[in-house]
Image (tube, grey):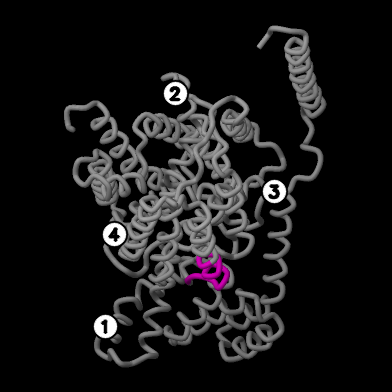
């Protein structure tokens, strides 16, 4: 591979290209020393967009949280209903609904709401997300799981209960993690 | 058989694959995904900006390790041969459908057995599908379906994929701004870089020496019965993974509540069936394609490129299944995959006159 003029020219060109590449990278590294990265930083942009979204959600659903904290759950549900109609694809409403229903002693309905929400956005069972409600959802599933199974075993023809078991299993699967 | 060094090397590879496959989850990879070539490809495609699912973006060191470990081993043992030219475009498309099959099942054949050995009974449908797919592929081979023979020589470009993966390795350490890394979801769960890379290199090198592959083991068992070391390798892999899962407290025998699994068993069966059929036609599962690409096989290299395209499309087009089930697009992709392979089998079949 080093026989004639053409071979030698190719080797020469390769050496020049690699040297120039190294020089470009070194010059860039020297210019960048001590400064923040230039150009578009997609990761940072994405993170900012995500935080803006979390802020917006907190702002939109803030009044519901206030009502819930004050124990005015019926009013909170009415407000949520209005928000869910305005933003039908938003998971946060379903999650909040689940939390309120859980507070009101309606765990089966709470499970159904959590499933709706998590199908729309898995961040609610992700520990690393600021939206995470993993602890509350895990708690509910841990408590209700055996009870739901027992009720299904006692009423094998009840399709509502079978659906509830399916939903509980879906939540268990999402809480177990995995790559998706 | 037990007196040959190949037999014991295959056992060592299988033992390491099963143990490390579970341990990587213990060390940080997603549950039951300690090793999953299709998940790693979807993650890496996302990291390179090929799809925008923010939960699936991480340049997996294991993937780079598998391929470069194979290259290092092939070079060290003078096994590196640049070769290619066997139905390249068909292989590219088969690579895409290979990942579609995995994405609908949620995992490659290695993860299939890792899931099963962790007690995930939803994987049973996948095992049945994989067996069926391999059998179908073998029926095709027996009836003259074969992609044309490759030619040898540097012009095949067999060195290009290892070079590409060296560039990916540099990216992994330099972290240029255009790379994307998940901060939540499965992509944000990973084992320490050095551990993952070392595991990948070791497994890549061993797999290059032994040619160990999940679908290859099943194929050889169908062809040769108990005489093939690959069958024992597969059993050692499953037992090692099961023991590791039990010891690490990750064993949960159930059909329900499993991580990264769904209950649409027919589609799990069909997804893995497609993977099995394609794997026999192209000479190995996704893991084996990486190993072959590492040792200079440009045809396997094109499958790897196809797998990256498939990984990106699986996420961008919503083909990949989730715990909620398989999407319409996932079902369409599987059926199109079967149609594509059936057409290919008709076209590539050598018929005696």
- Asked if residue B94 lies left or right of residue B253, the reply is right
On the image, numbered disc 4 is attached to which residue?
B119
**What residue is drawn where x is 58% and y is 28%?**
B159
Specify whether residue A139 is in view.
no
How many marks the image carries: the answer is: 4
The relative height of residue A136 versus residue B281 in the rendered view (above or below) is below
On the image, numbered disc 2 is attached to which residue?
B79
Closer to the eye: label 3 or 4: 4
Magenta segment: does it hold B89? Answer: no
On the image, numbered disc 3 is attached to which residue?
A43
- Asked if residue B288 lies left or right of residue B329, the reply is left
Magenta segment: does it hold B329? Answer: yes
Q: CA distance from mark 4 to mark 1?
A: 22 Å
Crowding around mark 1 (Cα neighbors within 10 Å: few <14, some 14 to 19, many 20+) is few
Q: CA distance from mark 2 to mark 4?
A: 39 Å
On the image, numbered disc 1 is attached to which residue?
A150
Q: On what subunit does the disc labeled 1 rest? A: A
Q: Look at the image and tell me in which quarter the N terminus of chain A lies.
A: top right
Specify whether residue B126 is in view.
yes
**What residue is drawn where x is 38% and y is 34%?**
B207
From the viewer's side, name the closer residue of A78 and B342. Answer: B342
Q: Are marks 3 and 4 on the same chain?
A: no
Crowding around mark 4 (Cα neighbors within 10 Å: few <14, some 14 to 19, many 20+) is many
Q: Are marks 2 and 1 on the same chain?
A: no
Crowding around mark 2 (Cα neighbors within 10 Å: few <14, some 14 to 19, many 20+) is some
Question: Within the image, what quadrant is residue A162 found in?
Answer: bottom left
Q: Which residues are magenta?
A: B325-335
Closer to the eye: label 2 or 4: 2
């Amino acid at each position: 591979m080093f026989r004639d003029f053409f071979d030698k020219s190719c080797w020469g060109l390769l050496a020049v290209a690699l040297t120039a590449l190294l020089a470009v990278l070194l010059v860039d590294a020297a210019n960048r020393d001590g400064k923040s990265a230039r150009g578009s930083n997609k990761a940072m942009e994405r993170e900012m967009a995500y935080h803006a979204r979390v802020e917006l959600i907190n702002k939109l659903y803030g009044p519901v949280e206030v009502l819930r904290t004050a124990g005015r759950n019926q009013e909170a549900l009415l407000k949520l209903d209005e928000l869910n109609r305005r933003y039908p694809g938003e998971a946060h409403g379903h999650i909040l609904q689940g939390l309120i229903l859980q507070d009101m002693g309606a765990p089966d309905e709470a499970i159904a709401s959590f499933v709706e929400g998590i199908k729309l956005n898995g961040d609610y069972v992700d520990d690393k997300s600021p939206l995470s409600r993993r602890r509350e959802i895990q708690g509910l599933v841990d408590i209700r799981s055996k009870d739901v199974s027992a009720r299904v075993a006692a009423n094998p023809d009840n399709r509502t209960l079978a659906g509830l078991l399916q939903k509980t299993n879906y939540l268990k699967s999402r809480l177990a993690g995995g790559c998706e | 058989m037990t007196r040959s060094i190949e037999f014991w090397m295959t056992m060592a590879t299988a033992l390491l694959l099963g143990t490390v496959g579970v341990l990587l989850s213990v060390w940080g990879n997603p549950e039951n995904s300690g090793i999953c070539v299709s998940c790693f490809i979807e993650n890496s495609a996302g990291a390179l900006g090929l799809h925008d699912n923010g939960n699936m973006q991480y340049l997996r060191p294991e993937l780079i390790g598998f391929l470069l470990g194979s290259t290092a081993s092939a070079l060290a043992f003078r096994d590196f041969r640049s070769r290619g030219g066997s139905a390249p475009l068909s292989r590219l498309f088969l690579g895409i459908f290979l990942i579609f099959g995995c994405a609908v099942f949620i995992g490659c054949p290695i993860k299939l057995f890792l899931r099963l050995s962790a007690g995930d009974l939803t994987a049973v449908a996948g095992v049945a599908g994989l067996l069926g797919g391999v059998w179908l592929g073998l029926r095709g081979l027996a009836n003259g379906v074969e992609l044309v023979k490759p030619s040898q020589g540097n012009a095949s470009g067999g060195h290009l994929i290892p070079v590409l993966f060296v560039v990916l390795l540099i990216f992994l350490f330099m972290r240029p701004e255009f790379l994307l890394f998940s901060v939540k979801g499965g992509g944000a769960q990973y084992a320490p870089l050095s551990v993952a890379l070392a595991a990948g290199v070791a497994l890549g090198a061993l797999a290059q020496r032994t040619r160990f592959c999940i679908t290859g083991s099943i194929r050889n068992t169908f062809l040769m019965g108990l005489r093939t070391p690959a069958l024992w390798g597969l059993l050692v892999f499953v037992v090692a993974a099961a023991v590791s899962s039990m010891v690490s407290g990750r064993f949960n025998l159930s059909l329900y509540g499993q991580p990264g699994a769904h209950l649409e068993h027919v589609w799990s069966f069909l997804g893995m069936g497609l993977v099995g059929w394609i794997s026999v036609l192209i000479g190995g599962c996704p893991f084996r394609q990486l190993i072959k690409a590492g040792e200079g096989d440009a045809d396997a290299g094109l499958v790897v490129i196809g797998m990256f395209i498939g990984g990106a499309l699986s996420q961008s087009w919503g083909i990949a299944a989730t715990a909620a089930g398989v999407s319409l697009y996932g079902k369409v992709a599987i059926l199109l995959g079967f149609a594509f392979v059936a057409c290919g089998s008709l076209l590539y079949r050598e018929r005696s006159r």
